[in-house]
Amino acid sequence: MRITPSIQSRNFLEDLARTKARMDKAQEELSSGRRVNVLSDDPYAAGQASEIEAVSSENASFIANNDQLISKFGFLDSTLQRLVLTLENAQTLAAQALSGTTTAESRAALSEGVTGTRKQVLSIANTQYNGTFLFSGSRRPTADAFTDNAPGFSYDGNDEAVYQRLDRSTTVQTNITGQDLFGDAPAILDVLDDLKTAIDNNDPTAIRAEMANLNTLANRVNSLGAVVGERTQLVEQTQSRLREYNLALKKETSRLTDANLVESISDFNLADQAVKVSLSSQARIEQLSLLDYLR
Amino acid sequence: MGSLFASLDIGRKSLQAHQLALQVTSNNMANINTPGYSRQQAVFETDFSVQTAAGLIGSGVTVKNIVSARDRFIELRVADQTQHASEQEALFNTLDQIQRILPSGTGGLQDGISRFFNSFSTLANNPESSALRNAVLSAAQNLATAFNGTARQLEETKSSVNRSIEDAVNKVNVLAGNVATLNQEIIVAEGGGTEASGLRDQRQEYIKELSSLVDVHYYEAQDGAFYVSVAGGHSLVSGNTTQPLSAVPVGIQGNFEVHSGVNNITNLISGGEVAGFIELRDRKIPAYLDDLDTLANTIISQVNAQHGLGTDLLGNAGVNFFNPTPAPSAPLVLPAGAAGNFSVNASLVADPRLVAAGQSGEAGDNANALALAGLAAAKTLNGGVETFAEGFASLQFRVGTDTQGAKRTFDAQSAVLTQLQNQRDSVSGVSLDEEALDLVRFQRAYQAATKFISTIDQLTGDIIAAIGR
């Protein structure tokens, strides 16, 4: 086959272009840190990474929501503990009222103490978290959720459970309704009203009955506190799983699309050497001409 | 019978023949970088013989003719391969642009879809929050912008490809005219029996350029003219006349059909850039737009349906969250599909309380926000087999595979074309080493001829001097 300068230069330029394309690809991998920079670099990996990106983004959203939920459950739990302490305080007042040494004066003080406890309970019942009532169900009363009509009260919330998704398949109730906590019989505020009346009337039987009710109520609040604790645990477990899942997704995305830097550097060096050798050899070939040897 | 004067004539012929050969050599060297140039050779021949007492003897040398070194079969194959390579190059170049319209990562459509559905999940934390409601609407508008932008870029690419078809048809007609003109010139120039090498080289270059545009087929008639046809047999050049192609805009989108006379040959073109452009405009890009529209349409219908099951903060049933895709109407405003027209209901943007986050009418009810967020994980696309994210990833996979395929085919076709061009140059290309050798050979022969003439002259002088004595 005759080799002409046009063949040599065409082959040289095309080989050089191919080598430079390899060099460019290696450089792109090194500067971006990614093996897949456009879809055609590896369509399967790009498609997979795109799906993973969506799942990972959704998980990140769940994680952010769950963090908020953990804070809310923490606040809910401490609110319930305050309520338990308040109920225990009422039980102490009732116990004192039952002692044989109470006078009319001390009973009046104890009655006043129960009134104060009732106010604390009412205050707890109207606790707000993030601008909304903690125990109003799905209703958002414009005034208080619980209005004092002493004796008695009115509830402006509802008994609706509110849920949140912890991940794609797990949902959890995020609230305890005022109905569950304060509305169901025996209602806390009613019990305190009755206790005050019993103390005012110096009625030991009634006081004992209300003490028993207070005990029931404390158990109820503690049970709800345990439920909140279980829910918190569920959120934390889900949270931990989501974080591990996202880490695994990140690893998978990295496996699919990240550049192997050692390989990229090696490719770059090989291509660099090839370009230099190619340029050098072509420069020498270009100099070779019979014309230089003829006189 | 030979004589000294006859010998002088032999010397003259040798001088002339080698001078001509040197001219051919210098022309070859001068055209070493001329595209499509075929090297020429002076073909020497012994001149007529004369009778001597000893027998017949040649009367010197003459250049019989000057021929170009060319291989018609390889030239045909170069033209044929140029069609395949150019078609794949056109496909790859445009697909490479398209794949960059559908990126992953922040700001991409996938990111927009995720953020939109995630915003409902966040809204569920505090469904009456106007800040979170505005965040949902903002994410929805960003999603609309992403869909609109992607559809618009695809439509613009399609429109640009369409204009390229018209440009290519105009180029084909100009090149066909050039071939016809050269046909005429070749017929005239070769009437005397000599090959019009330069004209043939030019014509072959025009054929090569034509091949990069459409699938041309040609043959050479006895008079030396090329008869060129396109799209499987529709005449383009017949001798010195052309049958120009025309780009006829059709429909409200103004898609150009390629016509040869009254025949629509659009779908018969099977090579060259135009074939690539037609494939892109009529099949690839519409398929991508269809996928994008299906995705957009499913999101619109699913979100609207779920939103309609909810109740807004005013206690009313949810209105359409996204505006339904309007039916295409004339004059068509592009982009026409669901992706191009993807938009958020303006009444929601004006009053975020209309976002139906609940189902009971209570402000703190987040049931519908949760259901809307849950749509992200629901397999509602393509007959219930894909989520929205999977659907978009499938589109990315499809575009990526098409681009990668076009690149690989283009590389393979280019390699074959390079090999054929090398084969062609191996036959027709100029080698400086060869020409340098020819230069020396002809120079030496020329020098020998001058020496010969000098010797004969001296002999003649000697005879004249002897006669004078």
Image: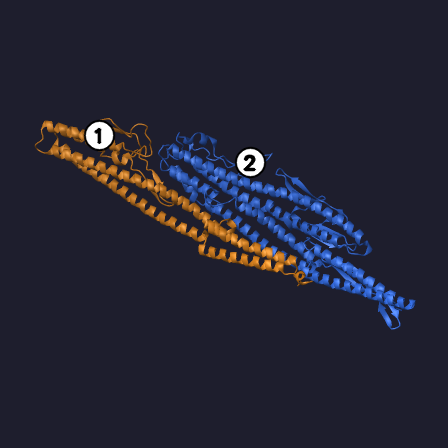
Chain colours: A orange, B blue
Looking at this view, is B154 or B309 the one in front? B154
Discs 2 and 1 lie in a common subunit: no
The disc at residue B327 is 2
Q: Chain of mark 2?
A: B
**Quarter holding residue A156:** top left
Dot 1: few (<14), some (14–19), or many (≥20) neighbours within 10 Å?
A: some
The disc at residue A119 is 1
Furthest residue to the right? Answer: B468
Dot 2: few (<14), some (14–19), or many (≥20) neighbours within 10 Å?
A: few
Furthest residue to the bottom? Answer: B54
Secondary structure at numbered mark 2: loop
For the question of whether residue B63 can be seen, the reply is no
Amino acid type at circle 2 is Ala
Looking at this view, is B10 or A258 the one in front? B10
Q: Quadrant of the C terminus of chain B?
A: bottom right
Is B165 above or below relative to B414? above
Looking at this view, is A278 or B119 the one in front? A278
Residue at the image point whose x is 23% and y is 34% from the top: A185
Q: Is residue B398 left or right of residue A246?
A: right
Is B360 above or below relative to B191? above
Residue at the image point whose x is 45% and y is 49% from the top: A49
The disc at residue A159 is none
Furthest residue to the front? Answer: B469
